[in-house]
Image: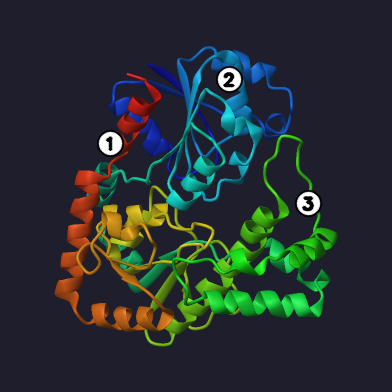
Amino acid sequence: MRFMLYRWKVFNQEDIKSALENLGHTVEYYEEPESKRKQEDYAELICVVMEYDAVISANYFPRVSNACQAAGRKYIAWTVDSPMLSMYHKSVYNECNYVFVFDKFNYYQFKNMGAEHVFYMPLAVNAKRLERQLSVMQEDEARRFAGDVSFVGGMYYKNSYDDIKKKLPEYLRGYFDAAMWAQLDIYGENIFDRMLTVDVLAKLAELVDFDQSEDSLSDIRLVFTNTFLGFKMAQIERIEALNRLGKHFNVNLYTDRPHPDLMDINCCGTVDYRVDMPKVFNQSKINMNFTIRNIRTGIPLRVWDVLGAGGFLLTNFQVELPAYFENGKDLVYYESLDDMERKAEYYLTHEEERLEIAERGRKKVKELHSYEDRIAKMLEIAGIL
């Protein structure tokens, strides 16, 4: 079949394209100018969609769904971010949709909303691509990316919560600050669900610009929890965790903009997802994963990529991890920041055990969690042969 892959700024879309091609399909990118993405009129997009047998994208786009519905084409979307706020839109009920969500909590939310064409599908790894890249890694590159503890990811230096914090009454600032610090050592549950009471939401509605289209299904609770508290929480958690690790170990941080509150951390700039990131994962003794709390139960892409590159992974606990990986066998997860420090120290001093875990994790994702396997299952569900 001939697929249109709707191009967007998503790390894994090239792996999706490769997997479809490996399954015998033809895939062509289509990218709209930013100005057209915001238009209500999508007649031109409908004409483009009609040239293909089906459309696929990493993450969900209401505009693409509506175009596929009008053109009579099936639309497959696989989320990489969670929650996917663009899914809270009337288009999610379109019959053309086959939307696959990697966060099971978010999946159940949409099922409870009556979205019949939403399915659960964890993320994947292109282990063969990673092996090819690492097989040609030069000695100077291996030395450059070597490290004891590494983290590759954003620090959320700019976030919406900091933009509005000064507008909040003092009692609300204290309320939110206390909640975020309390959340630090709570995994598997989000306390923001309980703290955003009707009175708090009413006050926020007075202070925060909340504009949405007529077709939107989101509300101020959803937006504030994720785009305000979620990103600020990620900043606080990553700074605290890295600073704790930096007191005892040599820590390399690969990010676009480090935060000034970081201490004793080697800030190494950014690395390209496809070129250098696998080398960091492969050459670091311990790779950290800090899952943003917006992802309630799912396993983020970083976890799959670290394991696929043969890296040892130390990650926060996520509810879905035990369904796919054995703790202490394929990877290691921690259940508090104190636990994180203890386990980092242990595995830095137990090299043989650490390397065995990394190798088992690599073999498991290569054998069981490829893009080809995931996408073949999606096509089966969508009735595409």
**Kind of residue indicated by mark 3:** Phe
Vertical placement of residue 12 versus 273, above or below = above
Residue 118, compared with residue 322, is above or below; it is above
Where residue 88 appears, x then y in whole percent? 62, 41
Residue at point 35%, 61% (across, down): 280
Q: Earlier in the sequence, mark 2 or mark 1?
A: 2
Label 3 crowd bin: few (<14), some (14–19), many (20+), radius 10 Å: few
Q: Mark 3 against mark 1, which lies toward the viewer?
A: 3
* Left or right: 242, with 167 as reference point: left
The image's colour scheme reads rainbow
Q: CA distance from mark 3 to mark 2?
A: 28 Å
Q: Secondary structure at mark 2?
A: helix
Left or right, residue 282 beside residue 232: left
**Closer-to-camera residue (186/278):** 186
Q: Dot 1: within a 10 Å radius of its alpha carbon, few (fewer than 14), some, or many (20 or more) residues?
A: some
Q: Amino acid at mark 1?
A: Asp
Residue that sits furthest to the bottom in the current view: 247
Element under label 1?
A: helix
> Quadrant location of residue 145?
bottom left
Q: Secondary structure at mark 3?
A: loop
Going from N to C along the chain, the mark reached first, 3 or 1, is 3
* Of residues 108 and 64, the one drawn nearer to the viewer in this rendering: 108
The percent position of residue 38, horizontal first and vertical second, equals 72, 34
Instruction: Check residue 69 in the rendering and tell me which mark sits there, or answer none.
Output: 2
Q: Position of residue 321 (x, y in %)?
A: 33, 59
Q: Quadrant of the C terminus?
A: top left
The residue to which callout 3 is attached is 210
Residue extending farthest to the right is 206
Q: Is residue 141 visible?
A: no
Q: In the rendered image, which residue does mark 1 sit on?
A: 373
Whole-angstrom CA distance, mark 2 to mark 1, is: 27 Å
